[in-house]
Image (cartoon, rainbow, N blue to C red):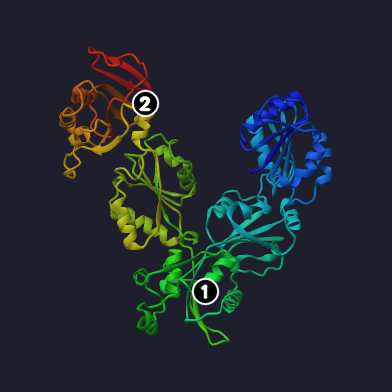
Amino acid sequence: MKKIAIIAVTEKGLEKALIIQKEFPKSLVITTLNSSDKNVSTISSISNYLTDNFLKLDGICFVTALGICVRLIAPYIQDKNTDPAVISVDDLGLNVQAVLSGHKGGANDFALKVASVLGANPIISTSSDVQNIWALDTLANQYDWQVATSLSMNKTMALFVNNKPTALLLDIKDKGTQHLEKTVPNFVTVFYDEAEIDYTQFELFIAVSYKVYTSTIASVFFIPKVLSVGSGCSKQLDSVLFETTLKEELKNRNIHFSAIKNVGSIDIKAQQQAYLDFSTKNNIPFSTFTSDEIDTITVPNPSEMVQSKIGVDGVSESTAMLLSGSKNVLIEKQKIHLENGEKFTFSIALDVKAERRTAIAIIGAGPGDEELITVKGKAYLENADCVLYAGSLIPEEMTNWCKPGAVVRNSAMMTLEEQIAVMQEHYKKGNAIVRLQCGDPSLYGAIQEQMTIFDELEMEYFIVPGISAFSAAAAVLKSEFTIPEVVQSIVLTRGEGKTPMPSKESIAAFAATNATMCIFLSVGIAKKVEAQLLEHFDADTPVAVMYRISWKDEEIYQGKLENLAKIVKDSKKTRTVLIIVGHAIGARKNRSQLYSPDVKHIFRTNKKFVVTE
């Protein structure tokens, strides 16, 4: 909300109004009281103020009794589509009531926000909120969908809030459909194929789709912008004929015109007036591509004539595929001859991100603690049909998030080929697949070779980042690894053992910066690492040797760099160790000396530090 008025009529109410105002910087506090506060506007009449400003405001917060609020706004209420969001807060800030324009105007969200500021009780009375079910009248705005209904939205919502049997059809995948899938009310049945719906069993039909459906029951259609249109044309193309004909062609194919996300052509058509007019009138972005870009696409219907004239196999299919990112088209090239003798072609592709297909989720599982997984990663894990995890690097407890019936395999004893075979089997079935990687997949996660194979097999995948061991190390050490005027960089690296290092990435080269060093996979060559670090770090630079950070058997040893190799040897740890080196470890302003000469190292186990002589 941009324009908000906070109206108070008592001194206590004015105190609360000023607290609320701090959370809404552009808001204005209005009162009839005398006040010297520069943030308060004193007026003579609230009624006169509302006469002039009611419809100009996005939100009004009354810090008054509810009855006063209702009487004051009553003369100005017109329509829920234009009325501002109105809420009422009592003088003591105990309760916050959404009064007017709860959904469309945003009063419910406004009330929840103000309640959180005051620590008050939010009072929301709209039926969908009370039942914790979808607010059908706000879903479109929330997820940037267009909306169409067979009945009025009020009648449609009445069916829904009365829990009438509802069929939900999801033809695409986006944040909105994922939300709907996760929050399905018990009276809603989800379908992914319209042919499977028996409309006699339902009273309401909801579709999230680019397709037009004709149902025999009350319907609401949410139309996402997911279609890319590619087009080529003759030298002249009438703007009006192009648009009306394209609309008719889509209508005949039961496709919503409002589902068009963008339109494209070859760069020699960049100034084609019909395309420019179409883009401007419908607020649909128009893009062009060079011949070289178009030549990267293998089109379903290559044209020898187009190749001979402009040097590419086709324009409409290739540009639709380039815009959408898809390797397929929904509608292959269509040749249209207009009544005035002009011609154009068009093809349509579905945005690859909106396709309902499976993809392998490569998920960062975090450093070890099963709760140190991202909310997004956990959600995918909970819904996966197949999960592969390396048991030596990821705690088995993390698989407790998996749903009953999921195939959960420890990949520690499997070859890469065996792992790929398992994932392929589930991929072909369209099952949800998760590959759990320790820490964050971008750091020593060995995902590069897996992704290469996925690319070769044309298996879709995506990555959900995780918490790296170095982040967990900073938390355990209660340290900020970047401290102004001390250290401003972090180096994540490994020592050179059996695996060669690039010539410019030696430990010594990085040590020359005196940045905070986080050294992975190097405990077996600790003596060599120590010597390289001492080329540039002082001997008394703090170090931490951290074994299985955040695991239940976590052990942490601290000391000075000159004793690094001895600390490692005494710890008897040979793997799953992260070495941290730098002045940021344990640094505090005006802190006392942490590392006295007679302290060899600090040992931490079972979540406690123990100083060892």
542 vs 237: above or below: above
Find residue 241 and report its image quarter.
Answer: bottom right
Residue at the spot x=56%, y=70% of the render? 278
Which kind of residue does numbered mark 2 sit on?
Ser
Crowd around label 1: few <14 · some 14–19 · many ≥20 (10 Å): some
x, y (%) of residue 325? Answer: 43, 63
Foreground residue, 579 or 416? 579
The residue under label 1 is 273
Asked whether the residues under the numbered discs 1 and 2 touch, taking CB atoms below 8 Å apart as contact, a structural biologist would say no
x, y (%) of residue 254? Answer: 60, 73
The residue under label 2 is 479
Q: Earlier in the sequence, mark 1 or mark 2?
A: 1
- Mark 2 residue element: loop
Residue at the spot x=18%, y=45% of the render? 502
x, y (%) of residue 75? Answer: 84, 44
231 vs 258: above or below: below
Foreground residue, 500 or 43? 43
206 vs 32: above or below: below
Foreground residue, 405 or 313? 313
301 vs 213: above or below: below
Relative to residue 316, is residue 490 drawn left or right? left
Relative to residue 594, is residue 177 drawn left or right? right
> Does residue 607 appear anywhere in the picture?
yes
